[in-house]
Image (cartoon, rainbow, N blue to C red):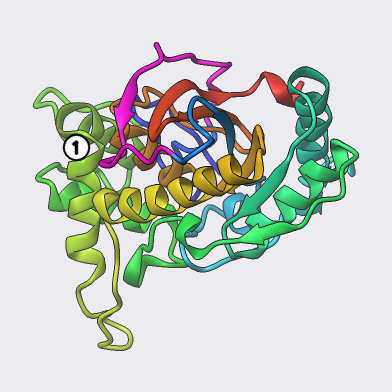
Amino acid sequence: MKRIRPRIAIASVVVLAATTIGGWSAAAAQVPTGAAELHRGHQDKTVTIYLTRHGQTILNTLERVQGWIDSPLMVGTSADGSVLDARILPQTVGKNLRAREGKIDAAYSADMKRHFETATYILKGANQRLKVTQDAGLREINFGKYEGAENKEMWTAIVEHMGYTVDHDADATAPVDATGQNGGWQTMQLLAITEQGLKAMMSAMKEIAEEPSEDTSIAFPAEDCTDVSDRMMDSLNSIARKAVRDNDKRVLVVSSGLSITCAIDSLGTTVTSGISNVAVSELQYKNGQWTVKSVGDTSYRQ
């Protein structure tokens, strides 16, 4: 799908999502989870979570909204006849993770095909045979009635709901006019995120995504960033606590771009650019606290 480079990351379904970050690192910021869950006999044990976005999918390639709906990793042929196989990159990431960080002790993914496939191929690249535990709490955001719609349709509706004006006939990245409005939909999307922030944009999405569909008159549930970060952190806390009990040091977790962004934001670290496919964010858990070590590191893909 087309990409733009915002200051805040957007999900796998969003044009912002596949921007390359190049190993952005945050200053480690410890944030309490709400309870200092110190386990008898396990104090001071550190668990490292490699929180990874899934690989590029068919729906990503077709520029379709992909939250709770699913599609497999993309395999196709380009115009010049070369093979495009999104299953290869996760294997490279797995190989480099193993070489640079050591063996993975446990693996988790969201409960969808794209997440499970990505985790499986990362483990294949790492030359490890581990069970991938699937967890619905690691899913991407639910986009309600926009699931499966074109990215342009959903994001135009969102930014217009937020008070911005989109030129529907202009190119996606067309600049704003003299009034500061009427730009292409991607341009106005970036402006809305920059001025109002990710949480406001996701709140606007939830408001309109839960309205009854014109085609079916059915109202579908949707989520905002708070909904996603709550369930993501519930899952991540459970995963980390189990790792402490099992003496696991390094854990692979595969989720989606917006879910990762919302979770990291809830830990006090603002993501300043898009999270690429199979980019790795490193989190550390110790004595009931989380430390964000890096966000969207693409160096494992090389």
Above or below, comparing residue 191 to residue 172 in the picture: above
Q: Where 54 sits versus 19, above or below?
A: below
Q: Residue at x 44, y 46 (%)?
A: 237
Residue 78 appears in the picture as rendered: no
Which quadrant of the figure has residue 86?
top right
Residue 134 left/right relative to 163:
right
The answer to whether residue 167 shows anywhere in this view is yes
**Residue at image x 64%, y 39%?**
251
What secondary structure do most residues of the magenta stretch adopt? loop
Q: Which amino acid type corresponds to the residue marked 1 in the rendered image? A: Asn
Residue range corresponding to the magenta coloring: 19-38
Label 1 secondary element: loop
Placement of the N terminus among the 4 image quadrants: top right
Residue 15, position as x, y percentages in the image: 46, 41
Image quadrant where one finds the C terminus: top right
Q: For residue 72, which quarter of the picture?
A: bottom right
In the picture of the structure, the residue carrying the numbered disc 1 is 182
Asked if the stretch drawn in magenta spans residue 257, the answer is: no
Of the pair 166 and 91, the residue shown nearer to us = 91
**Label 1 Cα neighbours within 10 Å, binned few <14 / some 14-19 / many ≥20:** many
In this rendering, position of residue 102 left or right of residue 220: right
Q: Position of residue 143 (x, y in %)?
A: 36, 63
For the point 67% across and 64% down, the residue is: 113
**x%, y% of residue 56?**
66, 46
Q: Residue furthest top?
A: 27
Whether residue 277 sits left or right of residue 296 in the image: it is right
